[in-house]
Image: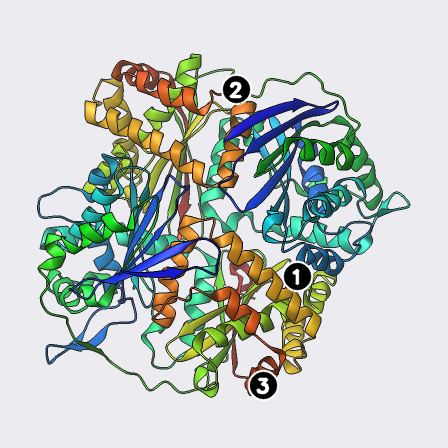
Amino acid sequence: MKKIEFNNLDQEMYYFKHQSGLDVYVVPFLNKKNFYAILGCKYGSKDVEFTFNKKEYKKPYGIAHFLEHKIFEQESGLDPFAFFAKSGVSANASTTFDNTRYYVWGVNEPYDNIDYLLNFVYSPYFTDENVLKEEGIIKEEILMYEDDPEWALDDNMRKNLFYELPVREKIAGTVDSILDITKEDLYDVYKAFYNPSNMYLIVGGNVSKDIIYERITNHKILNSFKEKTKVKRKEYLEPNDVKEEFKELFMNVTIPKIRYSVKINKEKFEDYSDIEINMYMGIIMSVLFGSTSDFKEKVMSENLTTGFYVEKNRYDKFLTLDITAESNKADIFIDEINKTLENIVIKKADFERIKKIWIASEIRMIDNIELTVDNIYSDLIMYGKVYNNRIELIKKLNMKKLNKFIENLNLTNKSLVMILPNKEKDN
Amino acid sequence: MKYKCIDLKYGKLHLIKTKKFRTIEVKVLFKDEIKKNEITKRNFLIDYLILTTKKYNTRKKLAIKIGELYSLFLSGYNTRIGNYYVTRLNMSLLDPKYTESGMLEESFDLLHEVIFNPNFLNNKANSNYFNIVKNNLKSDLDTITENPRAYANLRMLESININKPYAYNTLGYFEDLENITEENLYEYYQEFLNKSLIDIYVIGDIKEDEIKNIVQEKLNFKTLKKERCNIYITHDKITSRARKVIEAKDYNQSKLSIGCKISNLTDFERKYVINLYNIILGGGFNSKFMKILREKKSLAYYINSSVNKADNMLIIQSGISYENFDKVIRGIKKIMKSINEGHVSDIELERSKIEYLSILEETYDNIDSIVENYIAKDLLNLDDYETRKEQIENVTKEDIINISKKIFPSVIYLLKGEIHEKN
């Protein structure tokens, strides 16, 4: 077991690799009552085409999310939620484009519950009946999201941005695509991706690292995995430009919604690590659009929007800068974004202020079990390693690298999605 | 953890000392009886207060100051709790151990600026920021139907009794918004400061004397303590048959919202039994609703119930396909009736207790939940942590069956989604 310090904030983390290939991280908190554990798999909605055991597969869209629902099915008929409820522990799961996670949190019996988390995820049981049963539930889930304008912006923007990448499709698939999923499909993807060597276990909270180590090392089902699987995901030749520059749709909204996205190929920043790219991009976004920005002052004062937010996302080797807004004067608002992105100048004082704010939030983060565990998990998914020294990294960010980053940044490769009120459809 | 309550001239100072966190949190509560025509004004004022101050008179200046205080978190909002409208001004700062000495005073200085030196000049609000707040509130009202779940819930409550506080729209009202001016906002600010009942909560690794002195110096309110109205809403009449209300809008999914009146609870039922009843019925992944209506019958992705103690109301919500409406309603009624007839197993009761205790304990790792627990305890006159742990064990199966006879579905509201049905 390897001991790792966190940002010199009196918080330790431990790491070991189980013989099955499962990477295990443990963060014992001395003064907490709760525990929180994630068992995550590097398999998400984008992984529909792949080669496994020399065979090529193409699976229906939405299968990773469907599988996530069906993992809770057990041959014994026992419901995992009922097992956790015995000790008042909660569980849930979620699927994104590139990963699926199962998690438990609560106060009582952490070791038995974490054991069981592994048991149920590693005991698939799919039948024609239980697959059929899930279709109704997932259909309602898909319809629920279809009424949400922000999901609609997101779903349509990915279709605008990308030609080839499967992230064009919704995570949950469509009401039609899920009807094609069979139990055989589920076993195929399960065998290919749900191997411990393609997964992570992260545990935080009121736990002893030694007991976790002992329980995981002696875990029966985990020890039965003898072979590490080799899956080759299909690679896509994705052009650098955006597929569509504009799309307009109509929904039950009162104020129009817009999503403005820029597609950026990360390969242009070869001198920067992935986390540096994220951090410099984050600085730029905060300065240009954050609470102290001239942009925000202007668009709020001139009533060009009643609310907007800025995010960055990553899809494969691409980074996107995404601005979402509600606006009755979308044209002028978009002009303002264009002007802001045309000529980026960042003052040293703003740069240093944001670094200070980020350092403060690192200290806040370590008070919170969920945030700490979630951050470790997202580091592993995003970077394949855990950054335990973020405060150092933030301190090392400098103006010279920032300015060079800005020079390399092409923000003209953009697309726009607009949602207009239904009543304007016929005009 | 150590709790102490100190009486101040104008209200109470609640100190919670704990070494578990690296932050200090301060909440100033202003409590008043809710009045429908005051909701919009009060929302307006709170948004205006935290946007700028007289000293930091642009958003940018205030944001820079907040950054200098090591990214202080400052927020303000209103919530309705029963007959009360409660304003919170919250501040969360890093424990100065992790930043620099003097940060505690400086943070309280800023809170003082926000409350006592707002951005009013010549008894008038600043036009620019006045308009920003107005536009935001207007858009909140404009977009109310964009969240179908919340909208269905509001329409359901309005259908029960539009004159009761539970049916007030806490986003406010258009006509009230139009009547707010730069001048009368200032008048309302003074009224607000002078009439609210004030409680201040401070939690963290704090020193009692230090906090007491800072609070007395920086938060020197002039109001006087006074009588409260009853926070609990009671129902005038209860009918045995639920009314169905169906409205249609262009959504993909239909949203179901059922309001059940709760009547004549004993103190023990209100504090404990109702929580367990709700957990068993629809309060979580192991509820009867989830097990039967989702897992067995595949009728919904989510279907849950929740209790609002101050409103004496139990609310059931789900997203369904319209063609399943009757099936879902029959299913819900059947489940509620089965509890009424005694179908609650020992295991269900036992697990609901474990879940209750687990939720209670979970809150103790989160600084904000700890304060919120104290606030709820004070407002609703609940028991303390230790008493709750003991008392919950005393709930019996008979208690659950008895309370089920005090819950009356009043309105079954469906916001019918029309898009999907057309296809």
Do labels 1 and 2 touch, CB within 8 Å? no
Q: Residue furthest right?
A: B122
- Amino acid on which the number 1 mark rests in the picture: Ser
Residue A110: percent from left, percent from top: 27, 43
Residue of label 1: A291
> Residue B369 at x, y = what percent?
49, 37
Q: Is residue B277 above or below residue A84?
A: above
Q: As rendered, which of A386 and B332 lies closer to the eye?
A: A386
| Residue B421, x across and y down, in percent | 34, 52
Residue drawn at point x = 60 percent, y = 73 percent: A284
* Residue ID for mark 2: B381
The residue at 19%/48% (across/down) is A115
The residue beneath circle 3 is A404
Up-down: is A303 above or below B297?
Answer: below
The secondary element bearing badge 1 is classed as: loop
- Name the residue at 69% across, 24% down: B11
Q: Amino acid at mark 2?
A: Asn
Q: What chain does mark 1 sit on? A: A
Position of B395 relative to A257 (above/below): above
Q: Is residue A319 left or right of residue A112?
A: right
